Amino acid sequence: MAYIVDRRLNSKNKSLVNRERFLKRYQKQIRRAVSDAVSRRNITDMEQGESITIPKRDISEPVFRHGQGGKRSIVHTGNKEFVEGDRIQRPPGGAGGGSGSGQASADGEGMEDFVFQISQEEFLEYLFEDLALPNMVKRQLLSADSFDYHRAGVSEVGNPAQMNIVRSMRSAHARRIALCGKERRRRREVLAELAVLDEGEASEAVETQRGVLQAELARLNVKIHAVPWLDDFDLKYNLKVKLPKPSPKAVMFCVMDVSGSMTQDIKDTAKRFFFLLYLFLKKNYEKIEVVFIRHHTQAQEVDENTFFYARETGGTVVSSALNLMGDIIEERYAPSQWNIYVAQASDGDNWHEDNQRCHDALINTVLPFVQYYTYIEIGDRDPQGLWYLYEHLQRDFIDRFAIQRVRNNAEIYPVFRELFRKHAGEEVN
């Protein structure tokens, strides 16, 4: 039985290492391009790849040139008109000018940039780099369908890549000792007796005894050499067992105001924030549920498509969404078993008499049970009533309540990173 191990490089990815090195070198420019793309893209284009432009000055490399002076001989190919010593007329086009149609740079540096494309996976990787859901606690673990492999000793069967060389050699050595240990001891005795005979006087009896010992030594050598150095029985392989990889149960509530005070621009900004959050959850958390809630005077749990693209509108009663969220938590997501997260977006408008109901709903049915509550207020106006209510609550729940203001699309990505940046000791599950 023979094993063939193909150690040829993968021809399809010959430049993969160089590409990874290049991306690592220009991380600063790539992050800047990714951040700019979030603010200018449509929601439907948010998870596509991106063209990255790197200025020529950032990719310039040091070069060696001939200095002034010295004697040089230059041979130009295809020369049929000139010989050494002829003076060549300057090409037309003006002092310092070329024949091209472009404009020269004032400082002598060209304006050409290097442009390359990053894939969808790379774009999302840079987009959500160093982000995580805060305060994730492994309350009750899901029976996940993902697995990890763990070392579990050695086995006598396996593939060549998992061979344990040390254990195999140790087994082979033990087998050789067990099979021919007696013969090896007898061979040492025979060699010692032959050495004694060589030191003594020669006689016919000594020669006869030497012949007998040499014949026995030859027989012992044949028997010892007949034992293979390495046998199939000696091969040992690292044993890895497949264990289920548990995931903490988590749910994210996305709450968006769709009332009449939310202009179309504000709604688009809110949708960008939630779509960014949705992509982040899908990429980094396999076992997480997302609940979408839209509200005006009434709140409604909707699906993903309705949440992002429906155009329903009305008045503003924020407490309706908070009460619905509390009912859903009580009915489907027991706080003792689920990590509960909330992200809310609004322009801050709310009926004045509803603010107290919002306060009571948050204090009694939401904040005591959530791991992290985020609120963004969108618009360039002064803070509204809802902002002051949440600002007061933030002081009481500082470790699990975060609020931010967003004026336009350009601020969505920085605010998103601030709300969900990874802290020390936190991991993506």
Image (cartoon, rainbow, N blue to C red):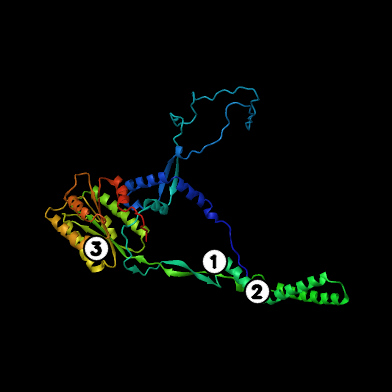
Q: Are marks 3 and 2 in contact (CB under 8 Å)?
A: no
Give the CA separation, mark 3 to mark 2: 67 Å
Looking at the picture, how far across and down is residue 193, in whole percent?
78, 73
Q: Secondary structure at mark 2?
A: helix
The amino acid marked with disc number 2 is: Ile
Placement of the C terminus among the 4 image quadrants = bottom left
Give the CA separation, mark 2 to mark 1: 26 Å
**Is tag 3's residue or tag 2's residue first in the polypeptide sequence?**
2
Kindly identify which numbered label has been placed on residue 162: 1
Give the quadrant of residue 275: bottom left
Q: Residue at x 36, y 62 (%)?
A: 286
Q: Secondary structure at mark 1?
A: helix
Q: Are marks 3 and 1 in contact (CB under 8 Å)?
A: no
Q: Residue at x 36, y 60 (%)?
A: 285
Q: Secondary structure at mark 3?
A: helix
Q: Residue furthest left?
A: 353
Kindly identify which numbered label has been placed on residue 369: 3
Looking at the picture, how far across and down is residue 426, in whole percent?
35, 57
**Is tag 3's residue or tag 1's residue first in the polypeptide sequence?**
1
125 in relation to 72, above or below: below
- Viewed as shown, does residue 21 lie left or right of 385? right
Kindly identify which numbered label has been placed on residue 177: 2
The amino acid marked with disc number 1 is: Gln
**Is tag 2's residue or tag 1's residue first in the polypeptide sequence?**
1
Give the CA separation, mark 3 to mark 1: 47 Å
Mark 3: give few (<14), some (14-19) or many (20+) Cα within 10 Å: some
